[in-house]
Amino acid sequence: MINSSLKTLSQMLASKQISSVELTQTFLTRIQQHNPAINAYIALDTDKTLAQARAADARIAAGNAEALTGIPFAQKDIFCAKGWKTTCGSKMLANFVAPYDAHVISQFDAAGAVNLGKTNMDEFAMGSSNETSYFGGVKNPWDFDRVPGGSSGGSAAAVAARLCAAATGTDTGGSIRQPASLCGFTGLKPTYGLVSRYGMIAFASSLDQAGPMAKSAEDCALMMNVMAGFDERDSTSLNRPKEDYTRGLANMVGAQPLEGLRVGLPKEYFADGLDADVAKVVQAAIAEYRKLGAEIVDISLPNSQLSIPVYYVLAPAEASSNLSRYDGVRYGHRAAEYDDLLDMYMKSRAEGFGAEVKRRILIGTYVLSAGYYDAYYLKAQQIRRLIAQDFTEAFKQCDVIMGPTAPSTAFKAGEKADDPVAMYLQDVYTIATNLAGLPGMSIPAGFAPSTDGKALPVGLQLVGNYFDEARMLDVAHAYQQVTDWHLQMPESLK
Amino acid sequence: MEWEVVIGLETHTQLKTNTKIFSGASTTYGAEPNTQACEVSIALPGVLPVLNKEAVECAIKFGLAVDADIAPRSVFARKNYFYPDLPKGYQISQYELPVVGKGKLTIQVPAGKHGEAYEKTIHITRAHLEEDAGKSVHGAVEGMSGIDLNRAGTPLLEIVTEPDMRSAAEAVAYAKKLHELVQWIGICDGNMQEGSFRCDVNVSVRPKGTEKLGTRREIKNLNSFKFMQQAIEYETQWQIDTLEDGGIIQQATVLFNPDTGETRAMRSKEEANDYRYFPDPDLLPLVVSDEDKARVRTHMPELPEAMKARFEAAHGLSSYDAATLTASRGTADYFTAVVQAGAEAKPAANWVMGALSAKLNAEEKVIADSPVSAAQLAQLLKRIQDNTISNNAAKQVFEALWAGEGDVDTIIAVKGLKQESDAGAIEAIIDEVLNANPAMVEEFKAGKEKAFNALVGQAMKASKGKANPAQVNEILKKKLG
């Protein structure tokens, strides 16, 4: 049951083979069993969770259930959920109980889904290993010595360890896709503006985007049906007609369902810096796509090597301003003792934020300062447009871009913790997508051996054109029809 | 040396919208602290701004009223600084690309020390939309400072002029004209006590005849025209004295103390702020199309200049009268209502500018709160026109109307003020007066014109003031003829 697809669970609930309470209880038991070791969840509230499950059962009994009614999900702790502690992985918000629901949360609530709890994450979504969380690191379910990736590390581990049916995440530079790669599941970062950011705690507003983290493309499609949609409370939310993201999945049958699909391989994504074993897995996946009928074309994204420097100007710039509201005045951490107002600000923020968050606030403050703005912020904005243009050009030659999601498999906890630049390079293949606002996906493509002889998951990245999520999900689904990488789970957690 | 003062103004006008500029919270003034602070106003984690279209409409109205360029695309930027009344740690404002560009406003500078009254055109540099901050409340709890975020997020239009003004009188005339205009077009309630209209004044001096601007000091947050006049005069003299004593002026922000009448520089630390402006990624650029402008134009009231010209042409009023009647929207509306209710324009103008205005001033009332309605005044004027009452009697009726003693005709009847217009009755009275005052008649016949007026007075007195004075004149003339 824990390995079942959302569709199967939905059918089981509808046919009363199982109740939502039973299903929820199954996951709560697993959480009780494994979470102390894995640390995927940082807030649990069994009463609230079971109340939702009971309500879902009533709704199913009343005959007005929707696809996700009664199914238990994990929610990244970046989403405000009324009555839930919402910390964003920070000491600053360690005691903050949200008085309102994020759009994503209310969408799941309206669908009748059950909230299992809030998942661990890098502090304010700043990190690629979940090690910057104030609430401690998260274990990679495939190897407890290793990180799950980040920033959505808690959601990633919860999905991989089957501590939920599926989870939500957010992706500013790769925070859904890189953990999906490192933990071996399917994650989608939608086109910027498709999922409302209302109630999602801001890191870098022009890049942040919520998306599904699940076992399969089909699960992601069902979740997208709930998550995507116009919300007038977010000015960057796109007002477009509702889509059914599952609409093309059933067509992915037969020997060559992807006939005519042009898959672009950017040469820059297969150059130095990519682990050889990871490259091998990615190439094998591409070979599989060829079998499915896809045509492979070589493309170039000439400015892609600039995406990390551009990102590390723009994201910290926005973050430095977004995080100014945590001043100890109205909510959040306030220093116990201080001399005056300035001292209160300084002590509260010095105590409330961790090292990585401080580093980014400093960088961001610097690049926006008088005299530096033009050289850093403005220049970075210009290059951002060039990077987006690269993709526009590329999509004249192909329908979907493929490549590695992350340059390596999961690394050991502590391995990169003291080397921020090495950590930043984890997102070398994912960041450009955020800068361009394009949808990106990671799907399990196999395993690569680690130095200590363990098999670790490898993700294949798909990048689509704007609003091309449905096609990307079809393309991923076709692959998942002929492979079973997405169904694998760690032996020790079965 | 002769000095010249150079003045520019930045005015924060609170826009009269129902809700805040980036949220649905109410903007009503005077509510219990923090009762009008929604999750956006208090900047909870995860909240986002959504631009209030009403505020944009106000900005467009202003742009149209001062004949300004309205930007087809303008950008909201974040102005970053920490202060307890600024919940997000940044203010959303417009920086490089404001919604309203260059415009102009013609002011009337009244006669004064400088001589005759004159007109002058003040150039508007820009006007931009931004959100107001909350307020710090000191002393509500002993030894503590509180924060009231009711005002946080109230829409403001900051209107900036070129350094076009050359005296405190010009600056005040501009501020008054602007104050009237924003109320006229309905974008601001103009309440200066409640902070709806606040002026920052940039003042510098230079030797007369030179071009180069002196170093300016900015007088912050003036909330009355009287203080503005005093503050500019003091500041100007202070700068001149400083320079004449061999000192230099340093750029500074100063505050005016109404108790001492002096300006004083705030801590210089305030000026060292680097606001790190950058475009707000939570908001899209503000796009104003020609259609938007056309739509707003259809809700624009007739502007004062146009109305003044119309009053002169349609009602034959003098330029001075027309200007006085259109100096405020309230007066113009009242006058228009009186005329529409059937009164003749000229006497209506005289009454509005005369008796009514005097009474309002004496009781410190605004015309909108006048106890005498436009319909009542029109009725009163009709009764003068149709000879029911004399001008003198009309003044009594007006006082009674003011005191709320009923409608015009009732008051005339109750007070017995109806004018005697029956020729026979008046003739009888005059005969009596002539018989009783032979000496006066003799004087008149001897060529003393004054005696005629004395006889008229006697006749009026004999009629207890009710005789129609025109008829008295006429009949008396005939009899003495």
Image (spheres, helix red, strand yellow):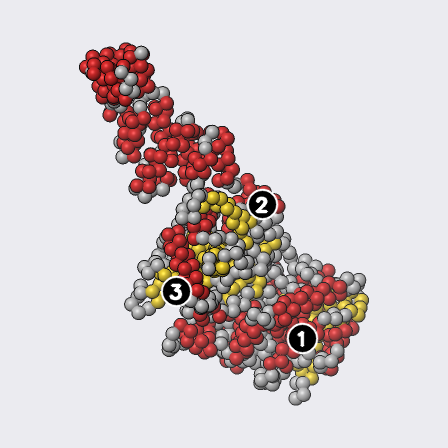
The residue indicated by pointer 3 is B264
Disc on res. B320: none
The residue indicated by pointer 1 is A428
Image label count: 3
Neighbours of disc 2 within 10 Å: few (<14), some (14-19), many (20+): some
Label 3: which secondary element: strand
Distance of label 3 from label 1 (alpha carbons)? 55 Å
Label 3 sits on what residue type? Answer: Arg
Residue depth check, mark 2 versus mark 1: number of the one nearer the observer:
2
Does residue B308 lie above or below A488 as drawn? above
Distance of label 3 from label 2 (alpha carbons)? 43 Å
The residue indicated by pointer 2 is B293
**Horizontal and vertical percent for residue B312?**
48, 32
A156 lies left or right of B399: right
B111 lies left or right of A293: left
The quarter of the rendered structure image containing the C terminus of chain B is: top left
Is residue B112 visible in the rendered image? The answer is: yes
Question: Between B443 and A301, which is closer to the camera in this rendering?
Answer: B443
Residue depth check, mark 3 versus mark 2: number of the one nearer the observer:
3
Label 2 sits on what residue type? Answer: Lys
Label 2: which secondary element: helix
- Looking at marks 3 and 2 on the same chain, the residue that comes earlier in the sequence is marked by 3
Question: Callout 3: residue from which chain?
Answer: B
Residue depth check, mark 3 versus mark 1: number of the one nearer the observer:
3
Distance of label 2 from label 1 (alpha carbons)? 46 Å
Q: Residue visible at 51% across and 37% down?
A: B306
Question: Between B173 and A463, which is closer to the camera in this rendering?
Answer: B173
B18 lies left or right of B66: left
